[in-house]
Image (tube, coloured by chain):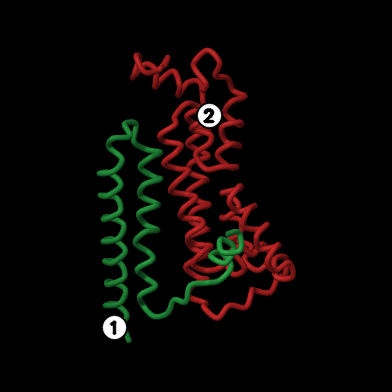
């Protein structure tokens, strides 16, 4: 856990990177465990619900759905795991510009929206973690809650 | 065990018809929870704030949808 003495500018990118890797991990690193856990559970459940609804082949397709994949990529750890699973299941379609053949286009649509929104929500969490890691913000919070700040 | 887990994520759930719009509700809830988690300083405020935001999003989208549908019905 980072406190006021140890917090430095270097911790802002670390918090951001950790949040990108695992949603909420940046907050946990900064000592905001409950906030981090809420983000971790909600974003991870949203992402994998999307994959379960639409199937990994139709939802996480780096070449066939480039823009959506960019949104999904904001949730780095989840997306890398999903791309790995896609590559494992169907290596040909994983990097093909053709969309995976799916009998359920509505499911694929729902899945893509869930995973894309989960990625964009994680972008919000990354920016929030970077903002909370900023020394000025940390000092401001400590002024507001003087007893909680040094725990 | 591993193959069962993989099967969950490799086979799509068959969805058809307007019922797929119901999937919008939990997605909006996720958005509301994460947004309010980042905005509220006191985490005890999150459940109520998220619920209000969720209701606002759903009612707002329903109103916009209804408005567009009415506009389309009148115009065409």
**Residue appearing at x 35%, y 49% in the figure:** B32
Q: Which residue is mark 2?
A: A29
Vertical order, A30 against A126 (above or below): above
Q: Chain of mark 1?
A: B
Give the class, few, some or many, for how many residues have Cα within 10 Å of label 2's Cα (few <14, many ≥20): some
Horizontal and vertical percent for residue A7?
Answer: 54, 19
Quarter of the image for the C terminus of chain A: give it.
top left
Horizontal and vertical percent for residue B1?
Answer: 57, 59
Residue B51, numbered circle? none
Image position of A84 (left or right of A133)? right
**Residue appearing at x 50%, y 70% in the figure:** A109
**Residue appearing at x 68%, y 66% in the figure:** A89
Which secondary structure lies at badge 1?
helix
> Do marks 2 and 1 share a chain?
no
Q: Evaluate if marks 2 and 1 touch, with contact meaning CB atoms under 8 Å apart.
A: no
Q: Which residue is mark 1?
A: B73
Which residue occupies the extreme front position in the image?
B1
Q: Colour of chain B?
A: green
**Residue appearing at x 62%, y 68% in the figure:** A57
Q: Chain of mark 2?
A: A
Which secondary structure lies at badge 2?
helix
* Residue placed most toward the observer, A117 or A42: A42
Q: Colour of chain A?
A: red
């Amino acid at each position: 856990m980072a406190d006021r003495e140890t917090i430095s500018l270097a911790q802002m990118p670390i918090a951001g990177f950790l949040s990108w890797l695992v949603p909420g991990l940046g907050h946990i690193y900064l000592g905001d465990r409950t906030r981090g856990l809420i983000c971790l559970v909600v974003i991870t459940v949203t992402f994998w619900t999307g994959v379960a609804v639409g199937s990994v082949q139709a939802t996480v397709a780096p070449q066939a759905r480039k823009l959506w994949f960019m949104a999904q990529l904001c949730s780095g750890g989840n997306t890398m795991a999903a791309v790995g699973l896609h590559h494992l299941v169907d290596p040909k379609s994983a990097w093909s510009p053709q969309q995976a053949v799916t009998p359920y286009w509505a499911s694929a649509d729902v899945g893509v929206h869930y995973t894309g929104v989960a990625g964009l929500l994680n972008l919000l969490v990354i920016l929030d973690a970077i903002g909370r890691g900023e020394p000025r913000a940390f000092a401001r919070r400590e002024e507001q809650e003087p007893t909680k700040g040094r725990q | 065990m591993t193959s069962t887990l993989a099967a969950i994520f490799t086979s799509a759930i068959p969805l058809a018809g307007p019922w797929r719009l119901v999937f919008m509700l939990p997605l909006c809830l996720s958005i509301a929870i994460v947004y309010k988690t980042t905005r509220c300083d006191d985490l005890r405020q999150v459940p109520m704030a998220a619920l209000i935001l969720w209701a606002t999003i759903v009612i707002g989208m329903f109103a916009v949808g209804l408005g567009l549908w009415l506009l389309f019905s009148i115009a065409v």
